[in-house]
Amino acid sequence: MRELDVAGDWYIVDGGLAELHNINLCLTMTAADAGWPEGVPGASPVAKAVSAAKLEF
């Protein structure tokens, strides 16, 4: 974020759960993360931080 004169790596952790109504807030979350792995409810939702940790940069 050079506009703010800040350098280095940034890590943002959100302690909330991935839920179907909020997966649009993060491009990396899917319905499977919200507990809908096959398009129907049934699995447990994962923490947003766990969803983000699956990413590779």
Image (cartoon, rainbow, N blue to C red):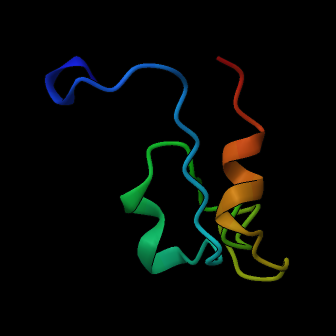
- Against 2, residue 12 (above or below) is below
Q: Quadrant of residue 13?
A: bottom right
Which residue appears at 33% of the width and 26% of the height? 6
Q: 29 or 36: nearer the eye? A: 29
Which residue appears at 48% of the width and 64% of the height? 23
Q: Position of residue 3 (x, y in %)?
A: 14, 23
| Quadrant housing the C terminus | top right
- Against 47, residue 5 (above or below) is above
Residue projecting furthest to the left: 3
Left or right for 11, reference 23 = right
Q: Quadrant of residue 21?
A: bottom left
Q: Position of residue 5 (x, y in %)?
A: 23, 23
Residue projecting furthest to the right: 43
Q: 13 or 9: nearer the eye? A: 9
Q: Position of residue 11 (x, y in %)?
A: 58, 42
Which residue appears at 58% of the width and 66% of the height? 14
Q: 53 or 39: nearer the eye? A: 53
Residue projecting furthest to the front: 5
Q: 16 or 8: nearer the eye? A: 8
Q: Quadrant of residue 34?
A: bottom right
Left or right for 5, reference 25 = left
Which residue appears at 77% of the width and 55% of the height? 50
| Quadrant housing the N terminus | top left
Q: Position of residue 52 (x, y in %)?
A: 66, 46
